[in-house]
Image (cartoon, rainbow, N blue to C red):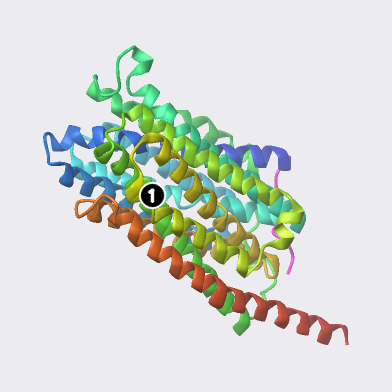
Amino acid sequence: MKRLTPLTPSSHAAMALLGAAVFVVALGYGAGLPLLQLYLSQYLGSAEPQQIAWHVGMLGGVYSFALFLFAPWWGRLSDRYGRTVVLMAGFAAFLVGDAVAALAPTLSIVYAARLLAGAGAAAILPTAQAYIADISTPGDRSRRFVLLGSASFIGFFAGPAFGTWLAGPVMGVSVGQMTSMVNWPALVIAVGGIPILLLAPWSLGRNRSTAELPPTPPTTVQRRRFILASMVLALLASFAVGTFEVGFNLFGGQTLGLTNGTMAIMFVTCSVAMLVAQSTMLLPAVRRRIDHRWVAATFVASALALSFTALVSDAGALGLLIAVVATGVGMIGPVLSYELLERDASARGALLGRQAAAGNLGQALGSVSAGSLFALHPAAPFWLAAIVLLFGAGAAYALWGTARDDEISSQNTLEVEHDD
């Protein structure tokens, strides 16, 4: 199969644009996390903490569920019509959704805006990864995937601090003192993303669609099993991500009584840990040693950390717990993306879109469960996430590992037959 050739002036310009788009989407998501409870108080007034917790979980769930619904669709469109047009359409939808969320007069419009923003964001990361795969050798692809993931985590890392700063300190007041300022981060990010949207055609050029390429060979049974196993792992790992994004927000704010500024630092800790973990993937020696045992151990380590949530009593302990969990689950996504394209890179957009959808479904379920279970017991969401991660460890060892070995064996057999 011929490679999709992007008609772009420079791969450096393309990488810069893709990194900027991914950064803005992550920044927009991260900026609102420590402010969600204050943001919702504008619409819920003096509601009970349990009701606010439910809406915190639901807003996170709506965004992630939109990612789940639309990621495969965007992926197929990017294979058919090219990456650039899909990236631009998705990014525009995200910016509009963010702006509407900032200006929404009612809670129902907030939910609609979050749905639109999530639907647009669903196009960005998988299509950007597919674009990178189109222009990269296998060695470059691994390195560029990590760089793209790093841009996402830097955005998520900067988001809480940026959002908290705009919600008050920029005007010399404490966070929440001027209620309307809680809406500023989303509006500023929406406006700030416009130049990136305008520069996309120049930086990315135009991709040929797969309709112009020869048909791809049929997918083998071993390949289908490996793809299914990868989707299962993406869902289970992302369930933990959705749980601790919403659960730690509620646990820190309602159980430990931490300030919004302190919560921002907690999310910074999370992002730094994920960034450091993903950066190790740049080392060839690390990539060569990754197999099903390594992935299973990562799941187990994160599960054990979450099981100790009930013992956390202060900000320092919470930050350490977040760092351990984020380090573990932060490495699983890039490993799955790299492995999916390692031996068969056909229909990249659709394939990465499906993986993103599986991960986003898990994240949506984790967000909703965290908001719902928190009212029963502050540690209940994390206990459930730990159990889910233990299932993930078993699936990684038995299901994903076996499917991966079978696919490698099948490919080696086909290569030998071809040589004969």
Residue at image location 54% in from the left, 55% down from the top: 126
Query: Magenta residues, as a range?
Result: 1-9
- Residue at the right extreme of this rendering: 420
What amino acid type is highlighted by mark number 1?
Phe
Q: Is residue 229 above or below residue 104?
A: below
For the N terminus, give its image quadrant: bottom right
Q: Secondary structure at mark 1?
A: helix
Q: From the top left corner, tell me how far across and down residue 28 is, in percent.
A: 42, 37
For the C terminus, give its image quadrant: bottom right
State whether residue 135 appears in this view. no
Q: From the top left corner, tell me how far across and down residue 164 is, in percent.
A: 37, 27
Q: From the top left corner, tell me how far across and down residue 266 is, in percent.
A: 42, 36
State whether residue 413 appears in this view. yes
User: Which is nearer the eye, 100 or 8?
Assistant: 100
Q: Is residue 23 above or below residue 332?
A: above
Residue at image location 54% in from the left, 69% down from the top: 230
Q: From the top left corner, tell me how far across and down residue 216 is, in percent.
A: 67, 74
Number of residues whose C-alpha sits closer than 10 Å to that of mark 1, classed few (under 14), some (14–19) or many (20 or more): many
Look at the image and say whether residue 305 sits in the magenta stretch.
no
User: Which is nearer the eye, 357 or 382?
Assistant: 382
Q: Main secondary structure of the magenta part?
A: loop
Look at the image and say whether residue 4 sits in the magenta stretch.
yes
Residue to which mark 1 is pinned: 244
